[in-house]
Image (cartoon, rainbow, N blue to C red):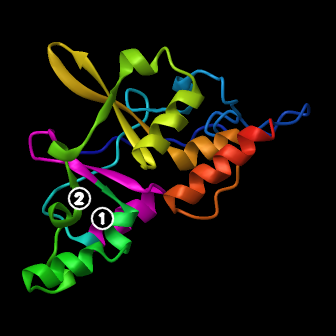
Amino acid sequence: MKHPSYKPLAQAAISSGGCHVLSAHNPAAVRIDSPALEVMTDLAVIPVATIAPGDSLHKANQSMLLRGVRLLLVADDGGGLSGVVTTNDLLSEKPVLVAQARGVKRDELCVSDVMTAVGRMEVLHFSDVSKAEVGHIVATLKAAMRVHALVVEERDGKQVLRGIFSATQIARQLGVQIVTYEVARTFAEIEAAIAGV
């Protein structure tokens, strides 16, 4: 197959009035009473970060680093959700304990060995989230002692994953600097920032 011959595009000087940088990728500052949807990663707009259950822990860690995320959705061949894997699942003592219990080396484990399986997960419904405020999400995450929450909705008779909440992202949008991934400390820092508002 012959490729077309491409010609270079015309180039021009920057406007004499200056050029401004768009801030669309920077999350907007929010308050505790802002709509919850302002802090949700909307998977209808942003591509989801996934990994296969049989992939290695090293591959999962590299994928997180490359994408700048701390959670990957574990999807089967048919696009169904099998579970989630977090940096904590990969970098804590969990893989070592699982490897010891099975009598294998840590390098022999795969994502499905350390992930949180879909059967052990709880989710939020988009219909509830769409009426909630940021404070409701913070309270929900804190009560569950989790730093992530998944949001689902019904489409064409099927449950689909619609969004993800991250305590780290919420803290960032509230203007709180999070220096640790420890759950209790994350919420203490968010609450301190809220108290100062």
State yes or no: residue 79 in magenta: yes
The N terminus: image quadrant: top left
Which residue is rendered at x = 87% and y = 36% of the image?
A: 18
Which residue is rendered at x = 18% and y = 75% of the image?
A: 98
* SS at circle 1: helix
The residue where tag 2 is placed is 115
Where residue 185 sits, quadrant-wise, is bottom right
- Cβ–Cβ below 8 Å for labels 2 and 1? no
* SS at circle 2: loop
Which residue is rendered at x = 43% and y = 35% of the image?
A: 46
Amino acid tagged 2: Met
State yes or no: residue 17 in magenta: no
Judged left or right of residue 152, residue 131 is right
The C terminus: image quadrant: top right
Residue 96, image x, y percentages: 25, 81
Q: Which of these two is toward me, 142 or 116? A: 142
Crowd rating for badge 2 (residues with CA inside 10 Å; few <14, some 14–19, many 20+) = many
- Name which of mark 2 and mark 1 comes first in the sequence: 1
Q: Is residue 136 visible?
A: yes
Residue 36, image x, y percentages: 54, 25
Q: Residue 60's mark?
A: 1
Which residue range is magenta in the image? 58-84
Amino acid tagged 1: Ala
Does 12 sit above or below residue 125?
below
Where residue 70 sits, quadrant-wise, is bottom left
Residue 4, image x, y percentages: 34, 40
Q: Which of these two is toward me, 50 or 139? A: 139
